Image (cartoon, rainbow, N blue to C red):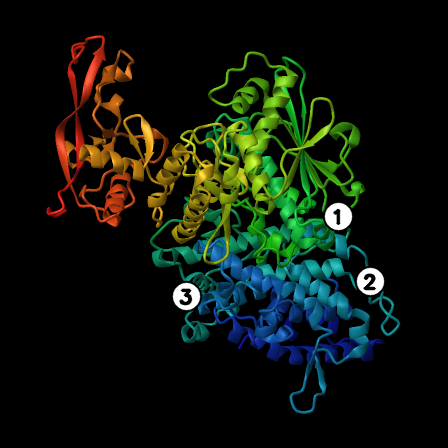
């Protein structure tokens, strides 16, 4: 049996017997009201053990414990009138009452309909590596995720829900009569909402407590005038008592044995079970252990140490706040041994080990951020800075689209990122200014998640609190996942400015976060100053300003193959326009760029999925291939790539060019290359979406599944065959080579390069029927990790692979025989021109296999053999040590020979 709340000094101060008490009736009325209130709340408090069995004790014994701990903190003579005592006791009763499902409308079913629940489920799936849970996973999660979500939502919301409980009614199941927690309607009307707010405040930052409770609340006409309520004092008592109520009364031994918790909860039970109630020792609140913590209980001891550190912080902050407002201080000013493990163990003892602070820590946080959030991560590329700041703005716009119905109603792609440069010819530095009209940031985000390296704001509790339902919205897919993008602003400059406000606020609410000494100095948070910070459009929610060296910017934007000879303003704007056009081609947010003459131009047109086929191809060609490179008839081949679950994964047509510059791997809407005009071996012209596999977004994994790509490939075959007269033999050959890896039959597109001419299979057959043999020139693949050359795959090759002198243009091949050589060469991934392990296999999708299948379909009998020496012609040219003028040239070849009608294939 534990101490009664009636024995606490605070209770006795307010309700204890006294002589000649002129307010005895009012005092007794409040005492009886509290007793009724306590009795009514008991069943609600006891539900916590049912709904959240892993938690330590949260029933009425915990409430009584708070009276005792609060009295020890405040001291025996702390002033507390009866109305204040009722408010304090009421906040004790309510502060944890919402840790049970019955405290919410509809209980668990009602909870599962809330945004908080949906957000929590999605967060838990993401912790398991599932970034975008399916609808089934969201609405019907497995039992462990369901229970974890209940715990998460109740834990995060119980304080705020406490505000509503005093006005909440439950219906009697039989009579329908409303049941209230507080039956004294006078007290409820006068102070019910205030008590609920004080109860909720135990989870508020101390600054919120100051902002809400600094004013003394008068006594209503029902109570003596001098019984004013000091909500600041009461809120501080509650938060300090709650933080310090970590002793044996929260974890009784029998319950600890009957209800053995697991994992982290077991540690909470373990350390509290081993602590006596705290006592006041010369302005210090001291905890003493019953028995030493052994080596096996080391984690329990450290958890006790951490918990008392939290209590110490609350005590110090509350005393400072009380002193600032000239309110009575607490007798306890600190916790014994807080922050110093060596001192803490003097009373909370250990046995068989020594508590030495060896936890991992980072002593130089700015250095770590500079190393891993700047050039070390992105390379010496200002282009990465541009991409990351645009991405942050794009995410903010995507969030606003999901939260602001009026904003979204204007245009499903409403919102824009604006970019300005400030540069003079031959200047050393370029100023970058980015603006967006997205969701914006309140000061709590500017000074919190924005500066928390490695924490993505979109997955935080603060995001869930500010924007309920956003995390679980399946149509909101932020690109920011790593919490490092903003720090790219410091890659080249120590001077960074961020100006922001929530989108619902006006220009007067803009706040500036100013960095003048980079990551090593303190940032300044102040009101926005147009003269100092620069003008901002009325529609702008956030502006970011940073700087980069001109030399690096020019080099990064130009790419590895362009030499910049002059750093003029016109050249800078030309390079920036081209870079942005390629970077943002597939972005779902409009990007606008201020040109050198002060006019604005749109960089992109969201979104490529909605463009006509013709515009898609034209824009792709102009932006990436230089214009007039892609066959305009490919427009009819432009098709979306969609997974079985309906997810849009890209849009493209097959590439028909040997030199492909029009394939875009889009990661979160951005082309992933640092420079876009690079020839690729990709089989498509268009956009394929990827998910990033590294934090710098330098590489990614395709979102599209093999079945989705196979469906797309079959459509390509259908379009090309239906309109084959619009494409050259070369285009059809390259298309076949690029589609060969998919589950399609490329035979209708196949051509052979016979000698120097691309021939259809029909024309190739005519030559075979004349010569009776057709030699496919082959060589062993060199870039293959097999020592035995005979084990390396065979590839089609051409004459230049056979004779180096012809490759070097020292001579030419004359008197050629009929042979087939490579055409795609190094311009595709090589699969199409690779030979099967069994060269006579006619079932695969490589060139030779397709030709054999063609012969089989025509009922033509043939034989296939590999020959190491086949004469293909005569060399004519300069003689070398390897070959003389007029010498025959031999090559390794796979020979396809026609058989007599009586022969077998």
Whole-percent x, y for residue 583 in the image: 55, 34
Q: Residues within 10 Å of mark 3 (few under 14, many from 20)?
A: few
Is residue 624 placed above or below 469 in the rendered structure?
A: above
Query: Quadrant location of residue 466?
Result: bottom right
Q: Earlier in the sequence, mark 2 or mark 1?
A: 2
Residue bearing the label numbered 2: 217
Residue at the spot 38% in from the left edge and 59% down from the top edge: 297
Please state the horizontal and vertical placement of residue 237, each as a whole percent of the image: 67, 60
Q: Is residue 319 above or below residue 430?
A: below
| Label 3 close to label 1 by CB (< 8 Å) | no
Q: Is residue 484 left or right of residue 729?
A: right
Q: Would you say residue 196 is visible in this rendering? A: yes
Q: Quadrant of residue 191?
A: bottom right
| Badge 1 element | helix
Marks 2 and 1, how far apart in space?
18 Å
- Horizontally, residue 476 falls left or right of residue 897, namely right
Q: Residue at x 33, y 44 (%)?
A: 747
- Labels 2 and 3 touching (C-beta < 8 A): no
Q: Nearer the viewer, residue 735 or 248?
A: 735
Is residue 342 or residue 793 the one in the foreground?
Answer: 793
Query: From the viewer's perspective, is the residue at label 3 or at label 1 nearer?
Result: 3
x then y, percent, for residue 58: 56, 70
**Mark 1 neighbour density, 10 Å: few (under 14) some (14–19) many (20 or more):** few
Q: Residues within 10 Å of mark 2 (few under 14, many from 20)?
A: some
Left or right: 479 in relation to 814: right
Image-based side of 661 in relation to 237, left or right: left
Name which quarter of the figure residue 180 lies in: bottom right
Discs 2/3, front: 3
Q: CA distance from mark 2 to mark 3?
A: 45 Å
- The disc label shown at residue 324, or none: 1
Q: Between 379 and 639, which is closer to the camera in this rendering?
A: 639
């Amino acid at each position: 049996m534990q101490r009664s709340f009636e024995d606490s000094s605070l209770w006795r101060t307010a309700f204890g017997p006294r002589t000649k008490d002129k307010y005895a009736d009012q005092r007794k009325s409040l005492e009886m009201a509290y007793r009724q209130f306590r009795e009514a709340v008991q069943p609600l408090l006891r539900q916590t053990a049912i709904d959240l069995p892993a938690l330590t004790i949260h029933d009425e014994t915990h409430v009584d414990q708070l009276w005792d701990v609060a009295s020890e903190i405040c001291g025996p003579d702390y002033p507390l009138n009866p109305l204040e005592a009722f408010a304090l006791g009421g906040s004790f009763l309510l502060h944890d009452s919402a840790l049970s499902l019955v405290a919410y409308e509809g209980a668990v079913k009602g909870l599962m309909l809330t945004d908080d629940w949906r957000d929590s489920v999605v967060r838990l799936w993401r912790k398991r590596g599932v970034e975008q849970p399916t609808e089934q996973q969201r609405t019907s999660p497995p039992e462990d995720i369901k229970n974890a979500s209940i715990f998460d939502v109740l834990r995060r919301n119980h304080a705020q829900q406490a505000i509503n409980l005093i006005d909440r009614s439950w219906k009697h199941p039989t009579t329908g009569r409303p049941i209230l927690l507080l039956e004294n309607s006078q007290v409820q009307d006068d102070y019910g909402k205030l008590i609920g707010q004080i109860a909720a405040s135990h989870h508020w930052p101390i600054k919120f407590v100051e902002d809400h409770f600094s004013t003394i609340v008068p006594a209503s006409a029902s109570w003596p005038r001098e019984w004013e309520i000091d909500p600041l004092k009461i809120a501080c008592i509650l938060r300090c008592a709650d933080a310090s109520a970590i002793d044996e009364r929260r974890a009784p031994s029998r319950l600890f044995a009957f209800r053995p918790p697991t994992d982290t909860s077991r540690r909470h039970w373990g350390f509290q079970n081993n602590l006596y109630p705290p006592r006041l020792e010369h302005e210090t609140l001291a905890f003493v252990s019953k028995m030493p913590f052994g080596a096996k209980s080391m984690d329990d001891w450290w958890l006790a140490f951490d918990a008392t550190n939290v209590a110490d912080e609350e005590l110090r902050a509350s005393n400072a706040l009380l002193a600032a407002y000239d309110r009575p201080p607490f007798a306890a000013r600190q916790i014994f041994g807080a922050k110093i493990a060596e001192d803490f163990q003097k009373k909370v003892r250990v046995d068989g080990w020594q508590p030495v602070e060896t936890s991992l820590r980072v002593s130089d946080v700015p250095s770590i951020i500079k190393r891993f959030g700047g050039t070390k991560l992105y390379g010496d590329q200002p282009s990465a800075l541009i991409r990351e700041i645009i991405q942050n703005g794009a995410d903010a716009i995507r969030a606003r689209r999901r939260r602001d119905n009026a904003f979204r109603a204007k245009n499903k792609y409403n919102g824009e990122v604006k970019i300005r440069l400030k540069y003079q010819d031959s200047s050393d530095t370029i100023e970058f200014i980015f603006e967006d009209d997205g969701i914006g940031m309140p000061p709590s985000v500017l000074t919190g998640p924005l500066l928390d390296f490695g924490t993505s704001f979109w997955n935080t509790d603060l995001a869930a609190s500010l924007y309920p339902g956003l995390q679980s919205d399946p149509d909101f897919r932020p690109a920011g996942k790593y919490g490092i993008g903003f720090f790219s602003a410091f890659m080249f400059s120590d001077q960074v400015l961020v100006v922001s406000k929530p989108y619902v606020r006006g220009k007067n609410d803009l706040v500036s976060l100013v960095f003048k000494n980079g990551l090593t100095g303190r940032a300044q948070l102040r009101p926005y100053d147009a003269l100092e910070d620069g003008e901002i459009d009325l529609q702008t929610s956030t502006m970011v300003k940073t700087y980069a060296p001109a030399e690096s910017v020019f080099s990064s934007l130009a790419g590895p193959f362009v030499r910049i000879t002059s750093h003029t303003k016109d050249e800078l704007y030309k390079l920036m326009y081209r870079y942005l056009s390629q970077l943002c081609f597939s972005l779902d947010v409009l990007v606008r760029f201020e040109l050198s003459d002060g006019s604005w131009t749109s960089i992109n047109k969201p979104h490529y999925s909605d463009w006509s086929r013709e515009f898609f191809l034209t824009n792709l060609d102009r932006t990436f291939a230089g214009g007039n490179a892609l066959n305009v008839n490919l427009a009819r081949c432009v098709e979306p790539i969609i997974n079985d679950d309906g997810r849009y994964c890209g849009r493209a047509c097959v590439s028909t060019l040997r030199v492909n510059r029009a394939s875009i791997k889009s990661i979160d809407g951005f082309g992933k290359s640092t420079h876009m005009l690079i020839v690729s071996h990709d089989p498509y012209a268009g956009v394929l979406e990827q998910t990033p596999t590294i934090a710098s977004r330098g590489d990614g994994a395709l979102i599209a599944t093999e079945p989705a790509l196979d469906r797309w490939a079959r459509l390509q075959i259908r379009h090309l065959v239906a309109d084959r007269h619009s494409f050259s033999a070369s285009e059809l050959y390259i298309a076949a080579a690029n589609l060969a890896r998919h589950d399609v039959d490329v035979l209708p597109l196949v051509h052979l390069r016979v000698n120097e001419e691309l021939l259809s299979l029909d024309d190739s057959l005519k030559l075979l029927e004349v010569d009776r043999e057709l030699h496919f020139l082959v060589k062993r693949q060199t870039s293959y990790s097999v020592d035995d050359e005979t084990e390396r795959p065979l590839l089609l090759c051409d004459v230049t692979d056979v004779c180096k002198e012809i490759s070097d243009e020292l001579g030419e091949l004359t008197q050629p025989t009929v042979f087939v050589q490579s055409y795609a060469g190094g311009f595709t991934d090589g699969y199409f021109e690779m030979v099967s392990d069994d060269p006579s296999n006619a079932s695969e999708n490589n060139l030779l296999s397709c030709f054999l299948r063609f012969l089989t379909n025509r009922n033509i009998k043939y034989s296939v053999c590999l020959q190491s020496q086949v004469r293909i012609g005569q060399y004519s040219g300069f003689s070398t040590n390897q070959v003389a003028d007029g010498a025959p040239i031999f090559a390794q070849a796979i020979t396809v020979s026609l058989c007599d009608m009586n022969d077998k294939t």
